Image (cartoon, rainbow, N blue to C red):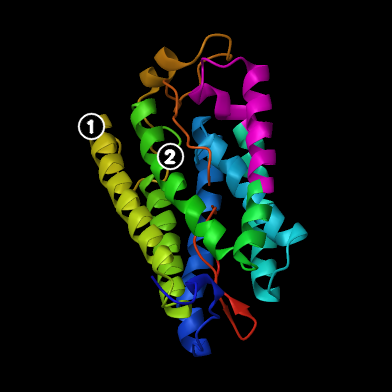
Amino acid sequence: MSQTAPVARGAADVPAALFWALAGPTGLGWTLTYVLAIRQAVRDGRVGVPAYMIAVNFAWEFSLTFLLEQTPSQRQMNVVWVLFNSVLLYQAFRYGRRDHPGLSPRAFRWSLCGVLVWASVTVTAGANEFHDMDGMYTGMIVQVPLSAAFLLMLRRRGSSAGQSMYIAVAKFTGSVFAGLTAFVVHPSHLLLKVLVATYVVLDVAYMVRLRRTMRAEGRPLWSRYARPPEQTTAAARPEGDGGARSGGTGAADANGTSGTSGTNGTRGTNDGRTTVR
């Protein structure tokens, strides 16, 4: 066991060019993930990110932006993410119950609000516990169940509704570069390495499963306009959820309840700079 807790060690002195070469694609990857997920949800009528994880992700970004101490560069990125996540959160309330037909509309709304509050408290407590002013530990911990939730969403829906290879690749890119940034900024933090390796494996598994599902549906992998088979939508919509909407699917999505855009990957500090996501 180490004599000094790795979390107590400061960030490494990383050249600015190397830092932004890794942190830049992290921010771009997650921003693109949000934009594509919002677009896909509008087209298919199904959330592009597991609904309860949207709540966790929003809580993470909101807490780090407005409630906790944060480096200036990271706060600016978080403000952008909070704006996109606000749209995703609205879509979660509007479309999310279609993945949970066993819940009444009221029960789903209250449970989503409960997860939002719980995640906000947990992120705040975790940031204080780890002195995690850049949200790196909380973000990495959230990333593992977020990646697992995508796999469960695909399995429970039984179709690619609300999903696309573009979303999967953008998320994978942002997450991988977040992990690489963590490795460079905090090379002695073993827990971060374990978390990164875990969610990368889950993301790869999700992309493989999504590809197989789309091919089985006859849906072109890289078409920006193709939708899942319409008959899947009509057959699987929960009772009382309105008329059939093309592109939706049935079955419940097993969203995990922990999160992070985000939530998210990793951040580290280096002379006032932080990674993103």
Secondary structure beneath label 1: helix
Residue at the spot of label 1: 216
- Marks 2 and 1: which is nearer the front? 2
- Quadrant position of the N terminus in the picture: bottom left
Q: Residue furthest top?
A: 239
What residue sits 65% from the left and 68% below the top? 133
Callout 1 amino acid: Ala
Task: Say if residue 160 shows up in the picture.
Answer: no
Packing grade of label 1 (10 A; few <14, some 14-19, many >=20) is few
Where is residue 145 shown, x and y percent of the image? Answer: 45, 45
Residue 110 located within the stretch drawn in magenta: yes
Callout 2 amino acid: Ala
Residue at the spot of label 2: 149
Query: Over which residues does the magenta segment extend?
Result: 93-121
Say above or below: 268 vs 149.
Answer: below
Q: Earlier in the sequence, mark 2 or mark 1?
A: 2
Query: Would you say 10 lies left or right of 212 here?
Result: right
Residue 152 located within the stretch drawn in magenta: no
Say above or below: 148 vs 21.
Answer: above
Where is residue 130 shown, x and y percent of the image? Answer: 59, 64
Q: Nearer the viewer, residue 42 or 189?
A: 189
Q: Are marks 2 and 1 in contact (CB under 8 Å)?
A: no
